[in-house]
Amino acid sequence: MHEQVAAAALEGAAANVWLVPLLPFLAFLILSFLTRPWGRVSAAVSILALTGSLVISAQVFWQRFTQGGPPMQVALPWIPLSPDHPLGSIELGLLVDNLSALMLLMVCFVGLCIQIYSTAYIRTEIAHFPTQGSASMSRFFGWISLFTFSMLGLVLSHNLLEMYIFWELVGLCSYLLIGFWYFKHSAAEACKKAFVVTRFGDLGFLMGILMLGVALEGFDFLGLTAKFSQGVPDGLTAGFVALATLLIFCGAIGKSAQFPLQIWLPDAMEGPTPVSALIHAATMVAAGVYLVARIFPIFHPAGHAGEAALVVAWIGGTTAFLAATVAVVQNDIKRVLAYSTISQLGFMMAGLGMGAYTAGSFHLITHAFFKSLLFLGSGAVIVACHSNDLWRMGGLRRHMPFTWFAFLMGCLALAGVPPLAGFWSKDEILGYVHSAPGGTALYLVLTFSAFLTAFYVTRMYFLAFEGPYRSAEKAPADLAGPVPPQAFPAPFPTSQALDVAPEWTEEKAMASGEDLPAACRGAGMEQVPHGGHLPHEVSPWMWAPLLVLAFFAVFLGFAGVPTGLGLGLPNYFEGFIHLSGEGHAHEFHWTPMLVSLVVALAGIALGAWLFARAPERGERRLRAALGPVWPLLAQKWYLDHLWARALAGSMYAGARASAWVEANLVDRVVLSVAQTIRNWGAWLRAEHTGKVQQYALMLLLALVLLAVGIGFVEPGFFTSRQYFLDLLEGGR
Amino acid sequence: MIFDPNPVAFWLLAAMVTGCALAVIRAHKLYHAGLALVGTLFGVAGLYGLLQVWFLAGVQVLVYVGAIVILLLFAIMLTHHMMTPNLKTLSTQPWTAAAMCLMLLAVLLGGILSSTWQTAPDTTVYPTWTSQSGFQVAEAIPSVKALGFRLLDPFTLPFEMVSVLILVAMIAALAVARKPPTPEDPAEGCEEVVP
Amino acid sequence: MSPIGLNHFLGLGAVLFCLGAYGVLTRRNAIAVLMSLELMFNAVNLNLVAFARFLPNLDGVVLAVFVIAVAAAEAAVGVALVLSIYRNFRHIDLDQVDTMKG
């Protein structure tokens, strides 16, 4: 049965914590069924609900921060199993500890900023599509609210199964919101891709959950992790645990876009920019990291990294490196940020894999702030320039000062410039990896990725905000635009099965002028020409949240300054979020901190040298310097092609096998069964003479046979009254 | 005092019932079969009387002989086969059916003979007849009054449902028996369809 | 002559039932089939009344009353069906009414 785990009931402000996810869910219901025609009312309801959640989660956070104490949880039986089943019952519950309280606050806060921003932003996108109106705004806020509910539920999950439920729910919301402009072919493709790719991981996740939960007779986090506090529990082999945890980690790979399932996240940028900020930068993609942090003791039984943890670390390192390299050559501002997100998630995974629980969580929180800031900033830029293409921007610093300032802060935080938030958290991961045994190679990879990060951030910043405004007309034709895929064919043939041109696209339909549903008529009109006027600052609804987020991007880092630095600041974050088993406060080294400082500055310097004055020349130089590597990067290391090929190959093999089975096994069985029954039918048909009396004769024959049979088997049936009395009591 | 019907009366009535039943199933003329049925029903009524369930004997005569048999005779007359001797009385399966019915009879008799019935020698509730003391009326005669109470106390619902059933059967008989109207002449009905 | 007990009545009922069944199975004329059916009803009623008398339990008589009522309903519907058959086939020979032939 369940081990007794030191956990308190929900008390104080935490007793209200169930309201935190519930309020956005109520908002979702209201938006869906009541206020659908009135977009602004919907936005107000949604924001109001989330504000309520924020207030409660802030109280909860404050309670945890000031009072501490053991984790608090409450659980209700959901699916009661049979009483002698070792699992007892499957429960639904809420778990409030320091990590979930902090995540709650972060999700609510970032979510609120993004929702306020969206009130202005989503109207600009709706304006692109003549057929879309106020109801689309309600739809947007409804789904955002549903997502917020799911994410908050995920954070508060009390056991793995419950987390899996919310895990799928956030996946669903991600799917809905990526495909928000469902009539755009690219959006429809992207949301399908995101859903399917993450599902690959989720399958492993579910299998891992079941393996671990059945083997350990429980799914709840506290019980599971407590069993690993003294090493791998009795009765389990280390290999079994490694397999189960790796399967669970598959879920994190999918959701957090880690190698090799990272391919969906860049395409997810088809969604409206606030969606990218909320789901694909701050919260949902961090769910994988949160999951790993939740079951951290299982990866590190008794404080020692298991085999699975090493895999986690290296997958994180690989992802950080690959994504950072691809981000260098992207022209789409949102795609730069998307690859940057993948890369930063890789940093977190690498940290968690090497045992840096505190550092990984810290980076998760700070990254959420500055990355959502960057995405929102890019959204403002896109609204101002009517383009995603960095080569059609430029000089925005003078035109949009507030956005510029906030975006600059985000860039500096991401690049890792002290004393901004990103520096402290990333440096903590690097420092931990550096001092961890066997972490040197990983440290080098991560440091190089940090250098690349600083470089591509600088490139993005200079292309967008410095120099003259290029606009669509003056963009350099050879550099701008998406990289044409035909320019860099894959070195191996991809299967035609996945490369066929779509049957229907809105462009084709618009060209032929038929088969175009009314709702889709706006799809082709998205690229309206800008009209030549200069970009201008966006509305305060949009830049005010940017400034709020920028404040945190600058100052949040001071919550986690290493105590060894001698600044006299206590390390609040480490005091708040740490494992009881973790080597408290790893030793502080100056070397990695100085190295990362130098690396960041070097990356910025290189970027500035190439792109500050003449970005076109710098880009050409960059491409020349990269040489044969450049097409590789532009084609995302051909990973999409590899996936397509692997999928097509496996699909064909599976189809051929199925066809053989179908023809030789299934058909044969089915046909022979059918033939047998047909023969019987022909035989029985002769008995259907249509003469009632013959039927009655058969009836009587059956009755007599039945009576005789029963008389032989159970003579008491006819002779004993006691027989029926026993029958009535069910004793026979 | 064990209840003891008169054996002579029983065997006479049994012979009458069986003989008439044989006539019912074997008579070539339908009219004779009808008359034999009347005899059978009277015999059964006599058996009820032998059992001193006089009320049921009366019902048997009234309902069966008075109503059902008349109904059947009407049907015989309506279908023109009243006096026509039907040479091929039996269908094509007389021997199979005979074997089957004999088997059924064997099963039934075997069951009856091998069973132990919990008969109660209770002579206080019902009127009794013994060959020694003749017909005796017990103190608490249930007969019709008890039957009436029985029908109205625990069997109220079935009782009422039977009345509904009879109503439905009446309507159904009307619906089935009346000629289907045709579009041309809905009032008169159509010519009979002869396949 | 040996005294008459419950088994005598049950045996007579069984004989009557089998005769009725034989009639139902073999008679060609539909009205004769209906008559045979009445024989079977009477066999059942005889059993019920005998049980009611010998066990003793008055409920058997009550059931017999119900059976008579249902038999009356059955006879009405049966005769209506016979008339309908006659109208459609011009005869009531059941061995030639085989439109249910499969």
Image (tube, rainbow, N blue to C red):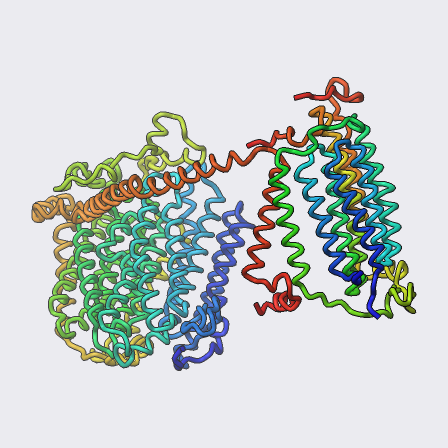
Tell me the quadrant of the picture where the C terminus of chain A can be found: bottom right
Quadrant of residue A431 within the rendered picture: bottom left
Tell me the quadrant of the picture where the N terminus of chain A can be found: bottom left
**Relative to residue A285, is residue A83 depicted above or below?**
below
Quadrant of residue A248 within the rendered picture: bottom left
Q: Between residues A423 and A538, which one lies in front from this camera angle?
A: A423
Q: Position of residue A672 (x, y in %)?
A: 37, 40
Q: Between residues A686 and B122, which one lies in front from this camera angle?
A: B122
Q: Residue furthest front?
A: C1
**Relative to residue A381, is residue A592 depicted above or below?**
below
Q: Between residues C98 and A282, which one lies in front from this camera angle?
A: C98
Residue A145 shown left or right of residue B46 in the figure: left
Q: Position of residue C88 (x, y in %)?
A: 70, 25
Residue A610 visible at all: yes
Q: Between residues B10 and C14, which one lies in front from this camera angle?
A: B10
Which residue occupies 40% across, 77% down? A2
Which residue occupies 68% across, 34% down? B90
